[in-house]
Image (cartoon, rainbow, N blue to C red):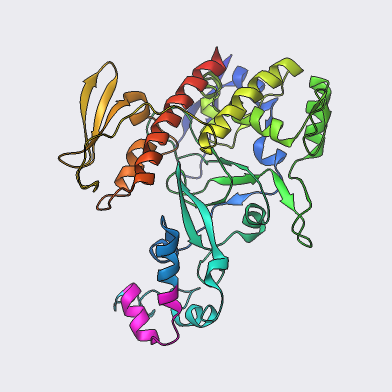
Amino acid sequence: TTDFTRIEPSAPFYFFMKRDTANEEVYNRGFAVNTLFPLNNVGVVTSRDGLVIDSNKEVLLSRIKHFADPTKSDGDVRTFFFGEKGRGSYLAGDNRDWKMADAKATIASIDHSQYVKPISYRPFDTRYIYYHSAMIDFGREKVMRHFIEGDNVGIVVGRQGQVVGNMPWNLVSVSKSIIDFNYFYRGGELVFPLYLYDAQDGKSRRPNLDMEIVGQIAEKIGLQFEEEKSGNIEAFCPMDLLDYIYGILHSPSYREQFKEFLKVDFPRIPYPTDANEFRRVAEIGGELRRVHLMEASLPLVTEFNVSGSNKVEAIKITEGGDGLCKVWINDEQYFDNVPRVAWEFYIGGYQPAQKWLKDRKGMKLEWDDVMHYQRIISALCKTNELMIKLDD
C-alpha cells in the first residue's frame, strides 16, 4: 500500500517522499472543511495589540479615550503610546498603511463603547478588541461581521506548520466571536462561521454551507436537513453538522491515521455511514464544543486556598503524586491538584494551562481570574476524556 513518488524541484537535486496511498484514498473520499464552509478567512491582524486589545474592557476603553482625546496633541499621544523612535521614514507607530494622526482624527468624536467587542485571542483566553477599521490593519470584516451581528459559532482550523515538533495534529477549536490571527501560534488559521447574517436587516441568517455536500450527507444518513433546529428527530441542522465535524477532528485515531495529510492541507472529513454514527459523533462533538466555549458546567478539579498577593510572578510546578502537581504563581501561592494531562495539553502551538498564566505575569489575579483558570483546567481534563470516548 506504499509507493515512493519522485519530486523534481527546480534545484539540481532529487529526493523521495514516502506516500501512503491506501490512507490517501480513504482520506480523499471525505469532504474538505474549507469547501463545506464557503465563506472563510484568516483571523484579525491589528498590528498594535498593545493599543487595541486588552483582557479588561474598561481598561481598553480608557486607553482608547486617551488615544482619541482631542485636547492632547498628536505628538504627546504618539510619544505616550509608541515612544519617539520610528522605523525608516515612518514616525513612531506608523507604517505603510496606518498613520496615527489620521486614526486619532477619525475616531475622535465617536462612541467608543460601540466598537469594543470580544475576541478569541488564544485558546480559553477571550479578550476585548477595539474593532474599528481605522485602528486595525486587517479586520477581515466580510467574515467577522457574522460573529458581531448575531448569535453564531465557528470552527477554527489551523494551517500546516503550527503543530509543535512531533505532536499529533491538534489545530482545531471553536469560537463565538472575532478571532485573532495568532490564535494557534504564528498565525494563518481559517475561521469558518456556521451562519451568515443578512447585511440589510442584520437579523435573518442562512447556513454557511455547501448545499451539495449537505445533500450527500443527508442521503447517506437518511435524515432531512433543516436550516434551524426544530426538534424533529428525523432531521439534522447546521449545528449538528458542525458538532459531527468537531468530534471527528478531535478523534485521536483520525489524527493518527491521516497525520501525513493533515500536515499539508486543511482537513477532509469522512462522510458518516448512517444516522446512528452521525448522532454518536455529533453528541460528543457538541459536548466538546460546549466545553471549549466554557458553556458546560464542569466540577472544579483544582484548589486555590493559600492567601497572598495573587500576583503572578514566577510560574513553576512541583510534583504532587498520582499524576497531579502544584502550579505555583509566586513563592507562596499555588493551584493544587492540577492534573498533569491538563498542564501539558496542547492546542496548536500553545499549552493553554501554561500560556494563560504566562500572559498574566506581573498581574494580580482577581477572583474571576482564579475561577476562570480553574475552569480551564477542568475543560482540558474533560477534553482529554471526551477524546478517548470518541475512539472508544
User: In this view of the protein, can residue 191 be seen by the observer?
Assistant: yes
User: In this view of the protein, can residue 351 be seen by the observer?
Assistant: no
Up-down: is 324 above or below 116? above
Q: Classify residue 370 as left or right of residue 277.
A: left
Up-down: is 225 above or below 110? above
**The C terminus sits in image quarter:** top right
Residue that lies at the very extreme toward the left in this rendered image: 331
Residue at (42, 25) in percent of width and height? 381
Q: Which residues are magenta?
A: 65-82
Between 388 and 233, the one lying in front of the other is 233
Residue that lies at the very extreme toward the top in this rendered image: 392
Between 336 and 251, the one lying in front of the other is 336
Instruction: Give how far across and how far down residue 58 sits, in percent.
Output: 43, 63
Up-down: is 88 above or below 42? below
Residue at (36, 79) in percent of width and height? 78
Q: Residue 144, located in which quarter of the rendered image?
A: bottom right
Task: Say if the magenta span includes residue 351.
Answer: no
Up-down: is 115 above or below 358? below
Instruction: Give how far across and how far down residue 45 sits, in percent.
Output: 50, 59
Dominant secondary structure of the residues highlighted in magenta in the image: helix
Instruction: Give how far across and how far down residue 373 sits, in percent.
Output: 37, 39
